[in-house]
Amino acid sequence: MSVHDSDSMTETVEDLLRSGVLLGTRLAERRIRNREMQLRDAAHHSLQAAEQERERQLHQRSHALASLEGVHSDNWWDHASANDIRQAWVAAREYQAQEPRAARAVWRIADELQDRYGIDVRRLDPAALGEQPQLPAHTTLSAQELHDYDRRLRRQTAELQTERGTADPDHQLKLDQQLNDISELRELIARELGDREHPTNHEPDRRRDARELADARIIAGPGDDPAAAPYDSPERREQLAERLKHLGASDGTIEAVILADTGQAQPADLATGQASRSLQGDAGNPRPRRTLHNQRRRNRG
């Protein structure tokens, strides 16, 4: 392989990782928001549904955190593909504000991307490292870059579907998760391209109006005024918590619903950039000490 070919391959990997980080952050935002909406919707349906949804989300979080263990291993990084790194980034960003383990994974991934590929996460996604609370409305990827990445994802989908045809059941489940991730990413790309062409979209406002009405119905007892407190206010959330407690919800479910409610009251781009209370406690955004291996590698550079 010529030096030119080697440089071209390195550039391709860096482009894939850059796109993966930017789109991965958007996917993490989306999952945070979907998780909040699902919990709120379950609470509107019934207390049992809220408890079941909370348990399901705790199970998902446990699985995601377990998948992040590899990022702290040099051996994992020596063999990780761009897709592996993107998936780890999504999981770390999704739970960063809730779990110290996810926050540490964010820093480790950022370190490794800088050391191994020269990719500076501080420039791509400043909010990941707590340096900027809000992200721009769109990624910095051009329309052409989005189309190129989408084509790669489409080819990867075909390869995974072919592999799935001969895989054992356990491996099929893993492949199904990858296919689902790719489907979500492609949907995000399509939405971002569509938003750039047609920036006016009132659907979020309609969804918000529906959530406000549902919350008002939970809070209001018989004969009460459902508009007793402004929607985005501590008073309304306190009323919601009191009502759920009166209906018999557990402390954990009440806390989870209120956290989801708080997240829904702010823009989605803040969800991955601000620390919030977890279902079990507070998690900051700790900066882990750089390993001796990383120090040596940086010194060699």
Image: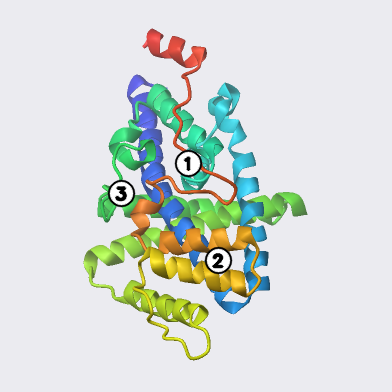
Question: Residue at the spot x=53%, y=37% of the render?
Answer: 100
List the residue tagged with mark 3.
145
Say which element carries label 2: helix
Q: Is residue 168 visible?
A: no
Q: What amino acid is labelled 2 in the image?
A: Leu
Question: Residue at the spot x=34%, y=73% of the render?
Answer: 230
List the residue tagged with mark 1.
89
Q: Rate crowding at label 3 as few (under 14), some (14 to 19) or many (20 or more) other CA atoms within 10 Å.
A: some
Q: Which quarter of the picture shows residue 205?
A: bottom left
Q: Where 11 falls versus 169 (above or below)? A: above
Which mark sits nearer the N-terminus, 2 or 1? Answer: 2
Relative image position of residue 141 (x, y in whole percent): 28, 48
List the residue tagged with mark 2.
39
Relative image position of residue 279 (x, y in whole percent): 57, 52
Q: What amino acid is labelled 1 in the image?
A: Trp
Relative image position of residue 25 (x, y in whole percent): 40, 48
Question: Residue at the spot x=62%, y=75% of the render?
Answer: 247
